Amino acid sequence: MRQPSQKEHPLKSFTIFSSMTVVIGIVIGIGIFRLPPIVAANSVNELQFMLFWLAGGLISLTGALCYAELSSSMPDAGGEYFFLRKAFGPATGFFLSWGRMTVIQTGSVALVAFILGDYATVILDLGPYSSSLYAAAVVIVLTGLNILGTVHSRNTQNILASVIIITLLAVSVFGLLNLSGEGAVSGLTLSGRNTELFSGGAPGLAMIFVLLTYGGWSEAAYLTGELHNVKRNIVRALVMGIVVITTLYILINLAYLHVLGFEALRESQTVGFDLTEKIFGPGASVLVVIIVVIAALSTANATIITGARTNYAIGRDFALLGFMGRWNTRRNSPVNALIFQGVIALVLVGIGAWSQQAVSTMVDYTAPVFWTFILLTTVSLFVFRFRKDHVPGSYRVPLYPLPPVLFLLACIYMLYSSLVFTGAGAIAGAGILVAGVPVYFLALKYHGPK
């Protein structure tokens, strides 16, 4: 196995702010413009609807505390890969990295790129494969930006995330100040089919979509090899990022309720468009497209940044994939890992172009594998606590074991839901993961793992 020299290690280039922008960029995507009506349809009234979004923030915060302890004790560019490898052995770590490389990260990049393509086509239609062409362009351009250097991708992420925060905040404030709103957020009444808060609705189904909208904060773990003062700053980046995200989600959903009203929100198919049209009048569709494109670019760039770190880590530890384990110190970037990730994402874009439902196919493809490894990473915290494998001075989850137990239960439920509510895409994702078995045994014969 090829060992990277000291000079090839990642340099400390991420701050609390830039780490926060990666977290925010991955989490705040198209979901907040599509999923609130589904959550509302499974809520009995306005108050229950808002409590679901608050619960999503609290569950995410609980998970973030668990990840902060892992990341603070074991900072590494491999993130979850490194945690699972230390807790359960090289095989588990390998399959996490294989899953991220072939399913989770690349599938997520393709998914977001397709969503951007759908909206960009509204402004400029490139023909029958317009969405796919835009998606391919997003993968190529953002991968190229990351290859140029981490400083470029990091600064771009700072700008994109800042713009989406300011935009969502502005739309929320304008919505809440809108005097012609149909709702009455001042009361958050118990109106609806039932006056009892928890006697109706479908809380379980609603939370599936809420947590899907909050998903992605765990990617901060992949920046710990490059984060300044990681023992102290990783918990700050995660907690502050989730607090910002939860605040924005609460505000935008209050604006939906105030401007559209609860019943209209439940029936809306284009909630972002409906909101901006009510606030700014006809012609606001262009504004919605711009907001979604910015959010999609932010998510795609952040996902490319963190995904390449896993590829670098597995290449560093397994000689068979050693071509990805080279770190370009001049650009402070895992160039080969980025190229390989980009190629796979482009293949998935091609598959999506052939599919009739590209977006739903990519969701089905990624969800079960994603929640499987989030669950295993949470379990690894218990393993390290049992072993007393703790670095002095690193962060520790308060009220242990309550937070990790609660988050573990949420992971189990989300894994179950992702298996029940997904289609053929989930089978394909699982099949690709299983295809990693012969690759792993070949890697063992090829002078690895470390």
Image: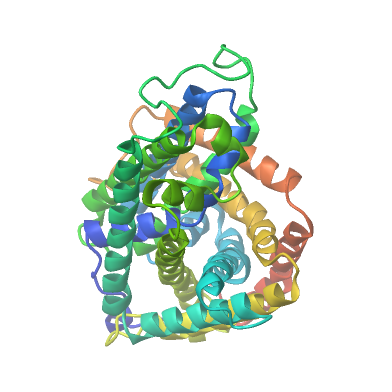
Name the residue located 44 percent from the left edge and 44 percent from the top edge: 384
Quarter-wise, where is residue 160 in the image? bottom left
Quarter-wise, where is residue 185 in the image? top left
Q: Position of residue 394 (x, y in %)?
A: 27, 46
- Classify 280 as above or below 435: above
Residue 244 in view of the camera: yes
Name the residue located 46 percent from the left edge and 54 percent from the top edge: 216
Name the residue located 53 percent from the left edge and 67 percent from the top edge: 119
2 relative position to 17: left or right? right
Q: Position of residue 114 (x, y in %)?
A: 58, 70
Name the residue located 57 percent from the left edge and 61 percent from the top edge: 96
- Classify 208 as above or below 132: above
Describe the colour scheme in one phrase: rainbow
Depth check, front residue: 192 or 94: 192
Depth check, front residue: 371 or 93: 371
- Please state the total of marks drawn on the protein image: 0
- Classify 282 as above or below 123: above
Q: Position of residue 411 (x, y in %)?
A: 57, 40
Depth check, front residue: 214 or 44: 44
Residue 401 in view of the camera: no
Quarter-wise, where is residue 390 in the image? top left
Q: Position of residue 156 (x, y in %)?
A: 30, 72
